Image: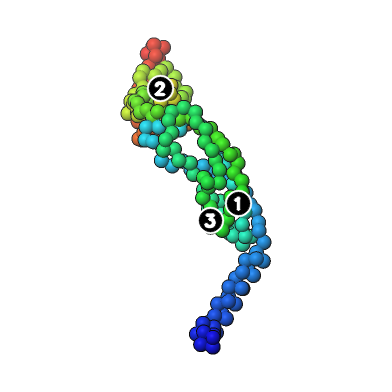
Amino acid sequence: MVNFFRLHVQHNFGLKVIAVGLAVGLWLAISRDPVAEVAVTVPIEFHRIPENLEINSERIPEAQVRVRGPERLIHRLQPSDVHAEIDLGIAIPGERTFDLTARHIRQPNGLEVVQVVPSQFQIGFDTRLVREIEVHPRVIGNFAPGYRIASIQADPATISIAGPKKRVEATEAATTDPVDVTGTMGRGSFVTHAYVPDPLVQIVHPAPVHVTVIMEKTESGRQ
């Protein structure tokens, strides 16, 4: 028994006392750390979106996540530390309902998710479509007396757009920012940009548009 005591108790006794003291101190520190809660609003991240699919909803919901944990961790928490993630790997065209629970939330270690709002949300999907549409220059201004527009040319004359199929099909043309031809006589060249009104339809390769406006005299101007 004496040998057992010396071997297992007295051996490195000082180090064992220190280890026990540290463990007790850590436990006391943790036990005195009050629990706190905070709500953070975070965007919903979509992962593994199929290449041939487009989100067909203009408003993407956000998630309000309430997390609980030691006050010292809550005080250091940043909204960017919390993520709401949804896997779209099996999504198909149409309106779809998704659950949003604690298992979809990624938060720092030591914190617990106690509530997620909303618990469900709906979002629409459509097949991705790419097609060419014409560019229609928008010309404004006060023409020089006795002049009118003879022709308007855009370079490029067409652009590629992409987005949800039904929305792309409904987009007839792209429009340029206003080109002011006030006082132009003969030929005027302008550099501007084209846009489409639907926020879910994108121009595939945005680039400046060169607009050429050719003016001619009216019948009254020739007199």
- Of badges 3 and 2, the one in the foreground is 3
Say which amino acid is labelled 2.
Answer: Glu
Alpha-carbon span between mark 1 and mark 3: 10 Å
Q: How many numbered marks, from 0 up?
A: 3
Say which amino acid is labelled 3.
Answer: Pro
> In what element is the residue under mark 1?
strand
- Of badges 1 and 2, the one in the foreground is 1
When the figure is inspected, residue 113 is found, relative to residue 165, above or below; the finding is: below
Alpha-carbon span between mark 3 and mark 2: 44 Å
Q: Position of residue 192 (x, y in %)?
A: 40, 32
Instruction: Identify the image quadrant of the N terminus.
Output: bottom right
Q: Are discs 3 and 2 less than 8 Å apart at CB?
A: no
Camera-nearest residue between 139 and 52? 52
**In the rendered image, which residue does mark 3 sit on?**
108
**In the rendered image, which residue does mark 2 sit on?**
169
Q: Position of residue 8 (x, y in %)?
A: 51, 82
**In the rendered image, which residue does mark 1 sit on?**
67
When the figure is inspected, residue 116 is found, relative to residue 137, above or below; the finding is: below
When the figure is inspected, residue 21 is found, relative to residue 81, above or below; the finding is: below
How many neighbours does mark 2 have within 10 angstroms: few (below 14), some (14-19), or many (20 or more)?
some
Q: Earlier in the sequence, mark 1 or mark 3?
A: 1
Q: Position of residue 206 (x, y in %)?
A: 37, 35
